[in-house]
Image (cartoon, grey):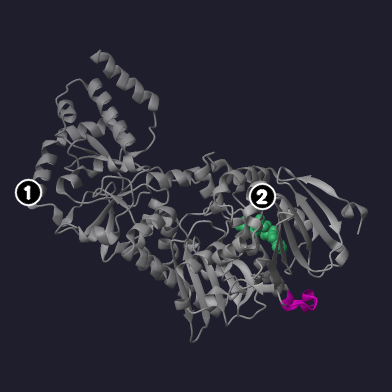
C-alpha cells in the first residue's frame, strides 16, 4: 500500500451532502430514532451483499458465515456502537459512499426544499437520508470498516462531525465488516439506554432477515444491573417468508420503510405466495408519494430480487413494466438460478411469466383500491396517474384494466381534480349518446372554457377535460372503451349522432342557407388562412371557433414534435361560425369591405387564441384591436 493511501486525509463533503446534512439535522429533530433503522438497514444490506458475493467466492466468508449485527451502548462514554460482519468497505468505497450522494435527481431535490421544516422533513424522508441520519443524534461519527477479502492492514477509519468535512485513514482491522461508533449529542443521551434501543429495534427491525444482538440485562435483587451475554432482539426472519396471518400491519409498514428508504407509510401492499408451475413469493407496495426521480431516465425502479431467500440484487427492473415503476417490493423466486445476472434476467420464460403475473397482481391491487378505498386511490392517481397513463400504449394485454384505472377532469365536476373514471362517464351517458366526448388543451382552464363545449353544455352532455402533457398522445392510442369510441369535440364535423333531433338538423340546414353569403364573404377575405368556413350550431355564446380535421395532431403534440425538430405539414383549420352571435350578425350587415376584413381577421385570431395556439401575426392582431378601441374612445 502506498504511503499516500495510509495517510490520514481530510476531505470536504460533496456540496449536496453538506446541504442535506444541515437541513436534515434540523428537519428530523422530531423523529430522531430513525437513525437506528437506517443503520440497521444498511448493515442488513451489507450482509445480503456479502452472501451474494460469497456464492461465487466462498472464501469471502473467512470461515465466519453467521452474519449478524451487534449493538452496544456505553452510558458513561455516551456512545452507541453498531457492528456488522457484512461486506464492509474499501478505502475508495468509504470515500464514495460516505462523502457523496450518487443519486440521480439530488440537486433538483435540494432545490425543492422550502426551508419549512415540516415540509422539508417529509421531502427528506422521501429522499432517504440513510447513513447521514446518524448526525441527527451524534455530534461525531466514527466508521471502522474492512471489506471482505482484503487484508487486515486494509482497514479504514472514517470520522466526521458532520459539518462539511470528514477524514479517512488506513487502520489495522482484523475482523471483516463495519463498526459505527456514534458519539451522542448531549441533547440525545436518551439513546444510550439499551431498553430504549431494544424498543426501537422491535419497532423498525423486527423482520429484518438478520439477527440484531444486544446484551441481555437483568436486575438483581439488590437493585444492581447485571449484564449478560448477547441475545437476539428481533425475530430475524425475512418477513415475506412468514404466513400472512402472523404479520401485523405495523410489521408490513416497517418492512416497507426498510426496503424503500421512504419514511412515509405505504398506501397499500399485497403479499402472495405462488405455488405450482412457478414458485415465488412477492410482496408489493404502493407508496404514498412519488419519488423525485420518477421521470428520470436513470431513476431507481424495480423490485428487490431474492432467489431462495438469498438476496441477489436491488432494482431488478425486469419484473414489472415501466408504467408500474412506482411500485416497490421484493420477489423471492425458487425457479431462478442463484447465479442469475441482470443480463440473464433480460430474457427467459420464468422472468416473463413472473412479470405478467406480478403486473396483473399490481393492477388488481390498484383496481381494488379504486373500488374499496377511493380516497386512497385519489392520492395514488394524483401521484402516479401520469405514469399509469403510459400503460395504455405500453401494455396492450392489460389495456382494459389500465383503462378502468384512468381518471379525468370533466364538465361534470367543477374543479381540475381528476376524479372521473370512464365507467362513471359511460354510466352518465345520455340516451342515444354513443361516443365518449373529450377535449384537449394545455390547461384545465383552457379546456373547461373552450367554446367547443357550448353545444354539449346546452344538451347536458358530459365532456372529459384533458390537459396533461401526455394526454394527446394517450388519446391517440385509445380507440374505445366498452364499445364506445372516443371523439375529440374540436376535431371533425360535429356529430352528435342520435343526440341531435330532427328539428336540430332542420334548424342547422336553415342556418346554413341563411348564412351562405356571410360564409362566402368570410372565405374570400380569409383566403388560404383557413380550410373552410362553416355556419353551425356548435356555438351558443361565442362568435366562432376553430375545428381541426379528425386526424390532425393536437396543438400540444404538434408543439412537442416541432420542438424536437420535426417538420410537420401545415394544418389548416375550419372556421366554424355562430351566425346568431351579435358580432357576426352585424358583420353580415356591414357594407364597408375594409371594416369587414378587419373584423373577420379578429374573429379568426380570437378563435385561434381560444384554441391555445399562437397567432401567426400577433402584432397585426394588436393593431386591429387598438384600431377598434380607438374608435370607441
Ligand atoms: N454497514 C455498512 N456496510 C457496508 N457498506 C455500507 C454500510 N453502511 C453504508 N454502506 C455503504 O454506504 C452507502 C451509503 O449509505 P446510505 O445509507 O447513505 O445510502 P443507501 O443505503 O445507499 O440509500 P438511502 O440513502 O436510500 O438509505 C451504501 O449504499 C453502502 O454502499
Specify whether residue 185 is painted magenta. Answer: no
Residue 267 image offset from top left, x and y in percent? 43, 61
Report the label total: 2
Q: Report the magenta residues as a range.
A: 54-65
Q: Is residue 532 visible?
A: no
The alpha-carbon separation of the residues under discs 1 and 2 comes to 77 Å
Q: What residue sits right under mark 1 in the picture? A: 503
38 horizontally vs 386: left or right: right
Query: Looking at the picture, does residue 76 appear above or below residue 15?
Result: below
**Quarter of the rendered structure image containing ligand 1:** bottom right
Nearer the viewer's eye, disc 1 or disc 2? 2
What is the secondary structure assignment of the residue under circle 2?
helix
Query: Looking at the picture, does residue 429 appear above or below residue 582?
Result: below
Q: Is residue 424 visible?
A: yes
Q: Quadrant of the C terminus?
A: top left
Assess disc 1: are there few (<14), some (14-19) or many (≥20) residues with their C-alpha within 10 Å of its C-alpha.
Answer: few
Residue 603 image offset from top left, x and y in percent? 26, 30
Residue 75 image offset from top left, x and y in percent? 70, 57
Query: Looking at the picture, does residue 295 appear above or below residue 117?
Result: below
Q: What residue sits right under mark 2 in the picture? A: 135
- What residue is shown at x 58% (from left), y 54% (from top)? 128
Amino acid at each position: 500500500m502506498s504511503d499516500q493511501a495510509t495517510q490520514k486525509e481530510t476531505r470536504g463533503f460533496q456540496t449536496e451532502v453538506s446541504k442535506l446534512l444541515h437541513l436534515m439535522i434540523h428537519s428530523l429533530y422530531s423523529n430522531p430514532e430513525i437513525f437506528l433503522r437506517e443503520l440497521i438497514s444498511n448493515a442488513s444490506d451489507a450482509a445480503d451483499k456479502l452472501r451474494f458475493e460469497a456464492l461465487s467466492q466462498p472464501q469471502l466468508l473467512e470461515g465466519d458465515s453467521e452474519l449478524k449485527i451487534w449493538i452496544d451502548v456505553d452510558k458513561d462514554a455516551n456512545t452507541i456502537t453498531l457492528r456488522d460482519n457484512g461486506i464492509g468497505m474499501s478505502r475508495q468505497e468509504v470515500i464514495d459512499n460516505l462523502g457523496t450522494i450518487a443519486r440521480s435527481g439530488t440537486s433538483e431535490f435540494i432545490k425543492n426544499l422550502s426551508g419549512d421544516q415540516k415540509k422539508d422533513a417529509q421531502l427528506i424522508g422521501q429522499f432517504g437520508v440513510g447513513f447521514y441520519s446518524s448526525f441527527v443524534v451524534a455530534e461525531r461519527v466514527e466508521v471502522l470498516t474492512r471489506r471482505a477479502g482484503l487484508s487486515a492492514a486494509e482497514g479504514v477509519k472514517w470520522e466526521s462531525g458532520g459539518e462539511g468535512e470528514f477524514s479517512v485513514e488506513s487502520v489495522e482491522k482484523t475482523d471483516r465488516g463495519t463498526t459505527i461508533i456514534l458519539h451522542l449529542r448531549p441533547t440525545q443521551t436518551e439513546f444510550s439506554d439499551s431498553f430504549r434501543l431494544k424498543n426501537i429495534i422491535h419497532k423498525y427491525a423486527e423482520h429484518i432477515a438478520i439477527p440484531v444482538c444486544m446484551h441481555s440485562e437483568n436486575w438483581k435483587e439488590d437493585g444492581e444491573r447485571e449484564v449478560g451475554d448477547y441475545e437476539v432482539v428481533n425475530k430475524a426472519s425475512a418477513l415475506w417468508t412468514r404466513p400472512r396471518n402472523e404479520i401485523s400491519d405495523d410489521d408490513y409498514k416497517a418492512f416497507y420503510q426498510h426496503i424503500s428508504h421512504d419514511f412515509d407509510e405505504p398506501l397499500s401492499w399485497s403479499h402472495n405466495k405462488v405455488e405450482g408451475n412457478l414458485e415465488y413469493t412477492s410482496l408489493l407496495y404502493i407508496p404514498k408519494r412519488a419519488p423525485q426521480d420518477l421521470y428520470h431516465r436513470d431513476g431507481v425502479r424495480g423490485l428487490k430480487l431474492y432467489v431462495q431467500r438469498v438476496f441477489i440484487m436491488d432494482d431488478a427492473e425486469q419484473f414489472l413494466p415501466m408504467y408500474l415503476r412506482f411500485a416497490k417490493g421484493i420477489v423471492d423466486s425458487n425457479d431462478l438460478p442463484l447465479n442469475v445476472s441482470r443480463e440473464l434476467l433480460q430474457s427467459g420464460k420464468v422472468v416473463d411469466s413472473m412479470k405478467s403475473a406480478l403486473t396483473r397482481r399490481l393492477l388488481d391491487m390498484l383496481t381494488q383500491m379504486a373500488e374499496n378505498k377511493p380516497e386512497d386511490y385519489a392520492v395514488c392517481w394524483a401521484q402516479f396517474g401520469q405514469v399509469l397513463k403510459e400503460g395504455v400504449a405500453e401494455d396492450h394485454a392489460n389495456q382494459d384494466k389500465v383503462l378502468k384505472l384512468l381518471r379525468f377532469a370533466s364538465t361534470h365536476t367543477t374543479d381540475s381534480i381528476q376524479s372521473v373514471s370512464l365507467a362513471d362517464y359511460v354510466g352518465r351517458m345520455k340516451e342515444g349518446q354513443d361516443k365518449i366526448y373529450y377535449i384537449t388543451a394545455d390547461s384545465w382552464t383552457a379546456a373547461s372554457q373552450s367554446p367547443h363545449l357550448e353545444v354539449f353544455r346546452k344538451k347536458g352532455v358530459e365532456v372529459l377535460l384533458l390537459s396533461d402533457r401526455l394526454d394527446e398522445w394517450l388519446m391517440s392510442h385509445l380507440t374505445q372503451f366498452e364499445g364506445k369510441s372516443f371523439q375529440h369535440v374540436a376535431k371533425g364535423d360535429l356529430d352528435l349522432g342520435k343526440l341531435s333531433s330532427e328539428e336540430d338538423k332542420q334548424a342547422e340546414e336553415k342556418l346554413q342557407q341563411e348564412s351562405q353569403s356571410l360564409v362566402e364573404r368570410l372565405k374570400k377575405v380569409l383566403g388560404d388562412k383557413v380550410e373552410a368556413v362553416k355556419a353551425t350550431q356548435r356555438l351558443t355564446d361565442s362568435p366562432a371557433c376553430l375545428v381541426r380535421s379528425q386526424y390532425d395532431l393536437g396543438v400540444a403534440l404538434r408543439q412537442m414534435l416541432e420542438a424536437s425538430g420535426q417538420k410537420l405539414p401545415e394544418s389548416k383549420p375550419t372556421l366554424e361560425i355562430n351566425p346568431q352571435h351579435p358580432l357576426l350578425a352585424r358583420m353580415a350587415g356591414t357594407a364597408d369591405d375594409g371594416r369587414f376584413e378587419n373584423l373577420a381577421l379578429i374573429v379568426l385570431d380570437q378563435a385561434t387564441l381560444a384554441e391555445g395556439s399562437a397567432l401567426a401575426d400577433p402584432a397585426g392582431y394588436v393593431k386591429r384591436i387598438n384600431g377598434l378601441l380607438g374608435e370607441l374612445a
